[in-house]
Image (cartoon, rainbow, N blue to C red):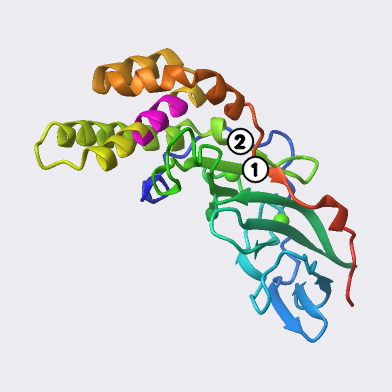
């Protein structure tokens, strides 16, 4: 179980999105977000207006498809937005998010994105600029090479609201988030390698765990802009892990170029105020 999101994050003075902060609206009434369900389906409401949520065909029958995940103020205007989580069913695929804001004339959808197995963990204003960031897990390394899902790394992913109201990967603006997870993965890799040297070690399981942590260490250093330091660290701790990484360097480079988060079903995002 990864625990980077439990570690305290050092607050940075750097703004997440320069020049986009709105002034908090001190006169606005609080927004009372809810996800409600009736005979016609699910909707998100701000207490005055409703926005009908899509009934995607791959939602499991009788599953509650949508829930209110978080109500962060992502643009610093003093009014909370709604982050609604959808679960599309299945084991390792399945978490999608729609983000809404409350306007005087109704509820407006800002964005929709797919995190796959990398669920949203929490919302926090990491740099105290008044705009809350979304902290999630990046699942792009799931099933890398021969790693079963349970041993696949889940990387830190920070999402910031852009000027265009979309949510973008801004993780690299928060190097302390990456560094905290790097420190954890390094300690864990050291521990796995120590365990492999003991006669009672389950060599297959511990070997997979070691590969997973080595992969995490290397990729985090890539995101921190110091991949050579990552290679040296893995080489020092687990030479065979580095050989494994080098055998799959092409595949890894391709995976790391994939953008996060993935957009989700933009064709369904027709603004529809249910009144
Ligand atoms: Ca807001
Ligand atoms: Ca912030």
Which quadrant contains ligand 2?
Answer: top right
Which residue is the extreme one toward the left? 199
Write the residue at 35% across / 19% down: 242
Q: Which residues are magenta?
A: 212-220
Nearest the camera: 232 or 44?
Answer: 232
- Locate the C terminus and report the quarter of the image it occupies: bottom right
Q: Which mark is residue 160?
A: 1
Does residue 77 appear to the left or right of 164 in the view shown? left
* Magenta-drawn stretch contains 69: no
Tell me where residue 88 sits by quadrant. bottom right
Q: Are marks 1 and 2 in contact (CB under 8 Å)?
A: yes
Does residue 108 appear to the left or right of 74 in the view shown? right
Q: Position of residue 132 (x, y in %)?
A: 60, 50
Tell me where residue 49 sits by quadrant. bottom right
Asked whether residue 203 is in view, the answer is yes
- Confirm if mark 1 falls within 8 A of ligand 2: yes
- Estimate how packed mark 1 is, as few (under 14), some (14 to 19) or many (20 or more) residues with alpha carbons within 10 Å: many
Q: Which residue is mark 2?
A: 170
Q: Position of residue 80 (x, y in %)?
A: 68, 62
């Amino acid at each position: 179980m990864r625990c980077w999101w439990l570690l305290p994050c050092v607050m940075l003075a750097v703004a997440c999105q320069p020049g986009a902060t709105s002034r908090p609206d001190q006169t606005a009434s609080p927004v009372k977000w809810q996800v409600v369900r009736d005979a016609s389906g699910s909707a998100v409401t701000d207490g005055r207006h409703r926005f009908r949520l899509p009934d995607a065909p791959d939602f499991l029958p009788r599953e509650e498809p949508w829930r209110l995940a978080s109500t962060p103020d992502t643009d610093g205007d003093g009014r909370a937005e709604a982050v609604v989580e959808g679960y599309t069913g299945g084991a390792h695929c399945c978490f999608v998010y729609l983000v809404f804001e409350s306007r005087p004339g109704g509820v407006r959808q800002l964005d929709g994105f797919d995190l796959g197995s990398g669920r949203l963990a929490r919302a926090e204003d990491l740099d105290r600029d008044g705009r809350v960031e979304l902290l999630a897990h990046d699942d792009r390394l799931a099933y890398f090479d021969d790693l079963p899902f349970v041993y696949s790394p889940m990387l830190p992913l920070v999402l910031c609201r852009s000027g265009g109201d979309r949510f973008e990967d801004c993780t690299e603006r928060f190097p302390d988030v990456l560094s905290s997870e790097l420190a954890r993965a390094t300690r864990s890799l050291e521990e796995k390698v120590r365990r492999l040297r003991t006669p009672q070690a389950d060599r297959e399981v511990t070997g997979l765990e070691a590969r997973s942590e080595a992969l995490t260490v290397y990729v985090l250093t890539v995101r921190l802009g110091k991949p050579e330091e990552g290679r040296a660290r893995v080489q020092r701790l687990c030479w065979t892990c580095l050989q494994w990484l080098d055998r799959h360097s092409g595949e890894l480079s391709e995976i790391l170029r994939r953008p996060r988060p993935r957009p989700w079903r933009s064709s369904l995002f027709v603004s529809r105020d249910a009144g």
